[in-house]
């Protein structure tokens, strides 16, 4: 029963922190370190659990953006195979937007491969105060854009903007740097409207998360675990998906209303507490 509650709690924690700009990876890591300092032995593979619960978040965000995803895929292939369709402004804009998604995804993908090969993240995760410092960095950038409104809608995103936002997402592999926060900050510094930056940020989450989830599933299938543990992973992933769905919709309203300052204050407090007491 205790182990079930642990998986339930971690699934909910992932679901809440994945969409909002507070760093889900940072929170999972901090929880693990707090338990270790309290000499609490928790028989959980946090890395695998984070990857599997990320699958739940992926499903939730895909559902939320399903209509837009389908429209983009249709426009992309229509543009390629139907030359006459290229005169259609929507089809042309959607096709261009698809490539801007690809371009913005590449930096994080490349950095993820490099970080894994060199075990960079393992070294960073050993320093809890570094995670606290990165939360302060997240707080600072959220504070800097608190009054930004932007002027560009989706069709005005340039390839330069895509590169800037892609580099922002690349930085977010660092524990304590929020992925959604980094990409939204990158978008708003590029003068995107708040809602445009939000949508682009979460569309970018999907291809990166697909790769991460596939690797996580592969690792899980190769592990020697009981059927009970498989069920616990599934429960955690389902809860993660439910809470990601709820909090993504809530976060969309927060971004629209320009209230990112609340997350800046939260990251400031948590980051300071980590540096001072952990």
Image (cartoon, grey):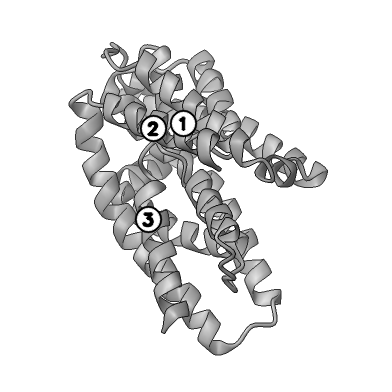
**Displayed quadrant of residue 60:** bottom left
Q: What is the distance, in whole Å, between disc 1 and disc 3 at their CAs? A: 24 Å
Identity of the residue furthest to the bottom in this view: 227
| Residue depicted at x 34% and y 34% | 266
Residue 18 seen from this side: yes
Q: Which mark is residue 188?
A: none
Q: What is the distance, in whole Å, between disc 1 and disc 2 at their CAs? A: 5 Å
Q: Provide the residue designation for mark 2.
A: 269
State whether residue 138 is above or below residue 8: above
Q: Provide the residue designation for mark 3.
A: 15
**Displayed quadrant of residue 245:** bottom left
Identify the secondary structure beneath mark 3: helix
Asked if disc 1 and disc 2 are in contact, CB closer than 8 Å, the reply is: yes
Which of the marked residues, 3 or 2, is nearer the chain's N terminus?
3
Q: Provide the residue designation for mark 1.
A: 272
| Residue depicted at x 26% and y 39% | 251
| Residue depicted at x 52% and y 17% | 159
Identify the secondary structure beneath mark 1: helix
Q: Position of residue 222 (x, y in %)?
A: 71, 75
């Amino acid at each position: 029963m205790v182990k079930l509650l642990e998986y339930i709690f971690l699934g909910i924690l992932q679901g809440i922190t994945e969409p909002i700009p507070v760093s889900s990876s940072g929170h999972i890591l901090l929880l693990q370190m707090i338990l270790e300092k309290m000499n609490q032995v928790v028989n959980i593979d946090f890395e695998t659990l984070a990857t599997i619960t990320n699958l739940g978040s992926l499903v939730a965000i895909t559902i939320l953006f399903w209509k837009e995803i389908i429209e983009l895929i249709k426009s992309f292939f229509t543009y390629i195979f139907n030359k006459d369709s290229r005169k259609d402004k929507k089809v042309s804009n959607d096709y261009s937007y698809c490539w801007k998604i690809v371009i913005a995804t590449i930096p994080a993908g490349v950095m993820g491969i490099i970080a894994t090969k060199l075990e960079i993240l393992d070294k960073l995760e050993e320093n809890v105060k570094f995670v606290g410092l990165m939360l302060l960095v997240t707080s600072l950038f959220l504070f800097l854009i608190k009054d930004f409104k932007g002027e560009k809608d989706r069709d005005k995103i340039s390839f330069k903007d895509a590169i800037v936002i892609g580099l922002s997402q690349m930085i977010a592999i660092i524990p304590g740097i929020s992925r959604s926060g980094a990409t939204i900050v990158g978008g708003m510094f590029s003068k995107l409207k708040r809602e445009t930056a939000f949508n682009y940020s979460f569309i970018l989450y999907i291809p990166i998360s697909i790769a991460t989830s596939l690797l996580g599933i592969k690792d899980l299938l190769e592990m020697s675990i009981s059927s009970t543990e498989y069920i616990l992973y599934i429960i955690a992933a389902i809860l993660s998906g439910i809470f990601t769905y709820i909090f993504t919709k809530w976060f969309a309203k927060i971004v629209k209303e320009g209230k990112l300052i609340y997350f800046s204050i939260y990251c400031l407090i948590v980051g300071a507490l980590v540096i001072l007491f952990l």
